[in-house]
Amino acid sequence: MRTAALAAALVAAAFLPGHPLGIGVLLVAMLVAASIWLDGRLGRSALLYGPPALALASMAAVRDAGWVVGIDLAAAWALATIAVARPSFAALAGPLLRLRDAVALAPPLPRRAPAALRGALLGGLLVVPFGALFWSADAAFAESARSLPLPGIASLPGRALAFALVLAAALGLVLARRRPLSMPAIDVPRPLGVLEWALPLAFLNALFAAFVAVQFAVLFGGHDHVLETAGLTYAEYARQGFWQLLACAALTAAVVAATAALAQTASRRDVLLQRALLGLLCLLTLVVLASALRRLELYEDAFGLTRLRLGAEAIALWLGGFFVLLLAAGVVRSVRCRLGPATVLASALGLLAFTLASPDGLIAKRNVERWRGSGKLDVAYLQTLSADAAPAITTLPPALAQAALTRLRTRLASDTWSSVNLSRWRARGLLGD
């Protein structure tokens, strides 16, 4: 176990700093996983959440967009912390808090270790002056020494940081697996009686229903109503309110959670009433999210797709999936009992699908399609995209493609074996590099 953790840290220090992320990240993740596997029998959580964590870490070898890979690696770490312990918010802090026990993992020093350390230090002091003399005395020896793959002094801080972080991550996960961190059970009082939670939910449903009715008349009904009543262009109307609607959906999730935690349900009738009101609220929220997505789609038609807008789409779709799970939990008991794990796994699979869909490639593709229809193209924005966008950009006329790929060509240096990446490899093939 200690050997695998040390190997992961050494590989990270040797091959990750100073190079684009690639297959080396997956190798480090697999060595960290091996350190956990060698420590003992894997539990159910490890088997459930471990594979998605490794799959997300492997995206560093598939996609070139740093913003996407960064989100994937953060999610992979969160899944790994949940995998080594029981699923809970406390598990996320477990590896960090358990590092104070890392001394227990250190192997006992051999009896001759101090003498060996002194001998190595003296040997190093002897080698330095003789090596310098040989270097200056013979050009062939100096050239051979220059060809050795030794790290430069400037890269040492980054390598030391990579070594420390990966070693701490591996040992922290092992220690969190041995002693999972759990939150103490708290008996939360339920102060809200039936009228105190049923009436607010009924009022909220009425407000949502009124808003949904307007949305069907406006966004799903056509341009004329907007132009006549709001005095705005369709694009201006679509731009308004997207983030507010997204915030409404997020607050609705908080309302559902608070109702489940604080509302008293003394009888089966109360339970059925609560599920009916919350179910209706979730259904109406899905329509609100559909309205938000429709607004964003119309705005993208007018001004093009960007990373921020695509990310907003993804968040809205994730919220929609979450409310579908809430609806299923209200009907199916097995889903209700496993809502937490189901949400985590569905989120991980959704993020994996989002990454495999190639966000930067999708942005470039939609903007190219918009150019074909309207003749409008933001070349400067296309220049900021990663190698994932190259397949779509190369479908443009040569002059436009050349302009949009100017910056990408300078970034497509040959990868080392540890930074091999599918998107960059494909882009080099398309650009003839």
Image: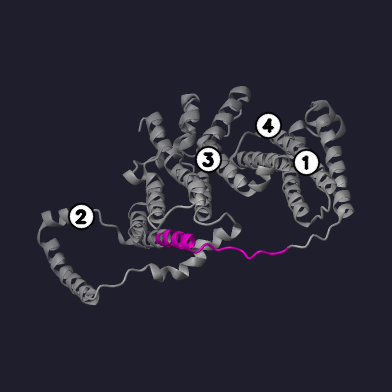
Q: Earlier in the sequence, mark 3 or mark 4?
A: 4
Cα separation between marks 1 and 4: 35 Å
Q: Which of the two residues, 243 or 181, is positioned nearer the viewer here? A: 181
**Which residue is depicted at the point 40% across and 31% down?**
431
Q: Which amino acid is tagged 3? A: Leu
> Badge 1: how crowded within 10 Å, few (<14), some, or many (20+)?
many
- Horizontal and vertical percent for residue 214? 84, 34
Specify few, some or many for label 4: CA neighbours under 10 Å numbering under 14, 14-19, or 20 or more: some
Q: Which mark is residue 352?
A: 3
Indicate whether 385 appears above or below 136. Answer: above
| 49 sits left or right of 23 in the view | right
**Which amino acid, mark 4?**
Ala
How crowded pointer 2 is (Cα within 10 Å; few <14, some 14-19, many 20+) is rated as few
* 3D distance between C-alphas at marks 2 and 1: 70 Å
Say what amino acid the circle numbered 1 marks.
Gly
Task: Read off the residue under disc 2.
Answer: 146
Report the mark closest to the observer, 1 or 3.
Answer: 1
Q: Give how far apart the Cα atoms at labels 2 and 4 are.
A: 57 Å
Question: Which amino acid does the dot numbered 2 rest on?
Answer: Arg
- Res. 279 mark: 1
Sequence-wise, which precedes: disc 2 or disc 1? 2
Q: Which one is earlier in the sequence, the residue at label 2 or at label 4?
A: 2
Could you give the CA–CA distance between mark 3 and mark 4, rounded to whole angstroms?
A: 29 Å
Q: Is residue 125 magenta?
A: no
Mark 2 touching mark 3, by CB under 8 A?
no
- The circle on residue 341 is none
Question: Which region is colored magenta?
Answer: 167-187
The quarter of the image holding the C terminus is top left
Q: Position of residue 155 (x, y in %)?
A: 35, 59
Q: Is 173 included in the stretch rendered in magenta?
A: yes
Who is closer to the viewer here, 11 or 46? 46
